[in-house]
Structure formats: structure tokens, C-alpha cells
Amino acid sequence: MLRTLFPFPGGVKPEPHKEASAKAPIASAPLPERLVLPLRQSAGVAPLPVVRVGDRVKKGQVIAAAEQWVSASLHAPTSGKVADIGHYPLAHPSGLAAPAIVIEADGRDEWRERQPLDWQKLAPQAVRQYLQQSGVVGLGGAVFPSHVKLDANAQIEELIINGAECEPYITCDDRLMRECAAEIVSGAALLRDLTGARQTLFAIENNKPEAIRALRGAISEQHEDFIVITLPTRYPAGSLRQLVYALTGKHAPFNVLPTALGVQCFNVATVQSVWRAVAHGEPVVRRVVTVSGNVRAPKNWEAPIGMSMDALLQLSEPLSDTDGLIVGGPMMGLSLPLTDAPITKGSNCLIARSPRLFPPRPPESPCIRCTACAQACPQGLQPFELYWWSRARDFAKAADYALAECVECGCCAYVCPASIPLVHYFRFAKGELAAAAREQKMADSARSRFEFRQFRAEREKAEKAEKLAKAAAAQAAKQAETATTPLATTQDATMKSDPDHA
Ligand code: SF4
Ligand code: SF4
């Protein structure tokens, strides 16, 4: 079926660098001896540990349980012993440590009992809870707990299954679509039924012909009416807002979720993990990670969550001049020194860096107002204005120029001839605005606490005064009564003793 696409503005076409890792099938990473599992693996509240040091665990057993709705449980990726619960470094430029559970593998990789879920007999809410307990989160990088997106009350028109994978180097979704198309289509059917979506649209960039073929074949075999839409290869076609616009023509501003527009979107790897959880009783304990860049054997590895990034990198044989890693894609990923921080549910790609592949950026020079950044911005912003106000620390003005609409895609910095790291400025300005908003909120709440205290003190004072006045009035009435009563008695006595009254 032909479908009109709504081209989003801007975008760029960086070198794809995908062929090297896309040609080999997904390989299974060998089980490491030790796995470090940060508790925070998703957006929202981190789950709480339900194991203690020394406990024996089986593969798939819950080790940290979600206690809040916007949270997802965490599971042991293999059988073994809980060796530690403490702080361990994350894959982040800050190098800061975060709470994590460490598991020493026993080598048996023994599953806990697995049962498929008879989801068709359950209420949608029960299925949502099951997905939360299975630790299903967005595996495209956003790691938002998937069950939260399955609001039974949302009126979903279009369900979008995102296989665009527009960032250079990353091919984990491409390989997954080629190798696990049937599971992805089954997962999409389940999500279609849970959301009640009228249409299910698969979105894939046209540089993945094998994946497109595999999905079309699986859709036809399963007799589904899903539509596979091929998108022109242009970064950031897979970004949520650009994708929703391209497929539906609906524009979601930064403060409006696509759900409010009747659209729900899931990444293909997430959809497969939904299906594995429901049909096989398998929580999310592994994920496919692209390892590429300055390595001898670029490949996609199915790796256990918690495996060290360095150990995974070694499997693809990094070249001797490797001097760091990019975690995620080169446009939006994090550039880090070589690290043994763990793979988490959100780690879709490790790119080995070298000075040859990623030469240092030329030094930043003054903006020449060429407007190339504005032409590249997929959000229709004026990045040079945002840059100007951010640099001048006039963050309110940057906010006026719709800084909040910036999706940090990096297109503007990519085309900037002055090598200005524009996104760094925007992140900084957003951070400052968020801090100012937090401070304002704290000041507002301190003021309302103070005003309430004052109001309560005045009310108590008034109540006390009223009580005192009442007590005084009661006392006065009593005194008046006392003063009146003896007079009457005396008079009465006088009358009684007066012989004339006899
Ligand atoms: S692309 Fe760079 S130099 Fe050109 S206007 Fe934008 S910020 Fe200035
Ligand atoms: S990083 Fe922000 S300002 Fe720059 S192109 Fe992307 S959305 Fe536009």
C-alpha cells in the first residue's frame, strides 16, 4: 500500500559505516565470570534489591523489584552467587559510581522456571504488570519502561514499530530484524491488541533491504495487516518526533507525548523482548550490542546485561591504536575513555575510537552566521541564536527561542564550519534552566511552607483568643450568676423571716 510520507525539515546524511558490522550474524558473547548490574537501568525510579550478598540466584530470577509504577524489575542474567551490593562506575563521562548488584557466575547458566503467559485470558493491566516485572524497557536507548506506554485509556490510532536505526555504525536492530522477524511481528501483534491501535506501521530506513524483506515475509506468514514503510536514509529519521511526523503528519511539541496525539512507538528490539517475556517467560537479561569502529571483527553480540564493556570490546579485537569508546552512535552517543563499566539495557553500540577514525575536532572559532545549522535542524530551530544566548548565559532568552524543543540530535554541530560544539552549549543551558526551575520550585515551596506556618500560627492565635474570650465570658456569666443568686436567697430569707410575710 502506498502511503504519504511527511518529510521533516533539515537532517543530515553522515557516512553510514554500517556494512562492516551488519554482514555477520549476531554472535552470542561467552558468559563472563562476573556481572555488574546497576540498579538504575531504566527511566524512572530504580528498583530495590531483593537479594543479599551470598544469596544463590538462578538466571532470570528477580534481584531488584520495581516498587513504583515508572520503574522496571532487574533480573540475574545467569545463575551464580550475589558477590556484592555496592557502588560501581557507570559508562558516563562523570565516571561516577552508582548502586549495583554483582553476580559471580557459576558457569551453569541455569534458568529459573519459565512459563509462557496466557495473556489473552488476562486483563490488559495484568499484562502491563507482568511486563514491568519482566524488566521490559525501551531498548532503542531511551529505556523508558514499556508497560507505562501501554495505557489502556489512551486512544491509539497508530502503533509505530521503529526499525529506522538512523545513527551511523549501529546495526543491532538491522540484524535483529533479519534474524528474528517472526518474533518481532508476534510482539507487534500483542502490542497492537494491548493498545487497541487501528494501524500498525513498521518504519525502516531504505538502506536495510534484507530487514525489510524479512519483516514483510513474517507479516505475510502471520496474516497480519501491518504496513512496512521504507524511509529515506536521513539522520535523525528514527528520532521519536521526526518519525511520528514522517509517518502521521502529527507534530508533537516537547511537552506533549505522542500518546496524546493517538500514536505509540516501540523500538524493534523492545518489541522482540516483549514477545520473549510473554511467550517464553524470559525477562530482559541479554541484549544485542553492535561493536564496531576501530576493531578487526566488527559484529553484533548478544551479551548478558552487566558484562564489562571492555570484555565485549575485546571479543571484536580492537586495534592497537584504540584510544577510547563511543557508547551509542557517533551523533548522540557518549565519548569515554576505555572502560570496564557494564553493558546495561540501554547500551546498543560500542564504537572503538582511534585518532584516525575520529580525528580531534578543529578548535572552535567564531560563528560566521552562515545559517547552515538552521538548515540542518530537524526541529526547525535557529541553533545559532540558541548558541548566542546560551554563550551569553541569557538562558531565559534561549528558552524564548524554544531551547526545550532541541532533541540534541547533533545535526547542527555536524554541519557547523566553525566547529562549535553546539549541543554542549544547549545541554549546558538546559541544565542551568532546569537548576533554576528546581531552585524556583524549592523557593516556592519554602514560601508556601512559611505562609502556611504563618497562617497556622495566626489561626491558632485567633482560636486561642476566641477560647480565652469564651472562657472570660463564661467566667463573667458565672460571676454574674453567683452575684445574683445570693441576693435572691437573702431576699427570700428576709421575706421568710419577716413576720408580715407569714
Ligand atoms: S553553522 Fe556554525 S557558524 Fe554557521 S551559523 Fe550555525 S553556529 Fe554559526
Ligand atoms: S541539536 Fe537541537 S538545535 Fe541542533 S539540530 Fe538538533 S534539534 Fe536542532
Image: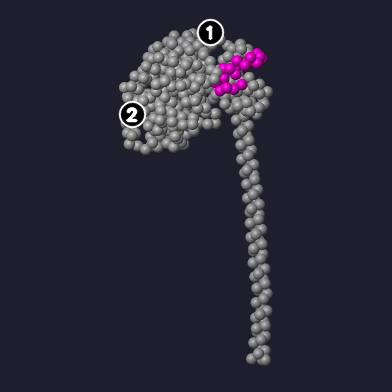
* Main secondary structure of the magenta stretch: loop
- Residue at (50%, 11%) from the top-left corner? 15
Query: Contact, CB < 8 Å: mark 1 with mark 2?
Result: no
In magenta, the rendered stretch is 364-382
Q: Which residue is mark 1?
A: 356
Q: Secondary structure at mark 2?
A: helix
Q: Is residue 370 magenta?
A: yes
Residue 285, image x, y percentages: 40, 25
Indicate whether 444 appears above or below 271: below
The residue positioned 47% from the left and 11% from the top of the image is: 17
Residue 75 visible in the shown view: no
Compared across the picture, whether 93 is left or right of 217 comes to right
**Quadrant containing the C terminus in the rendered view:** bottom right
Number of the label disc, if any, that sits on residue 279: 2
Q: CA distance from mark 1 to mark 2?
A: 46 Å
Residue at the spot 40% in from the left edge and 30% down from the top edge: 198
Q: Mark 2 packing: few (<14 Cα in 10 Å), some, or many (20+)?
A: some
Q: Check disc 1: other Cα within 10 Å, few if <14, some if 14-19, many if 20+.
A: few
160 relative position to 499: left or right: left
Q: Split into 4 quadrants, where in the image is the N terminus?
A: top left
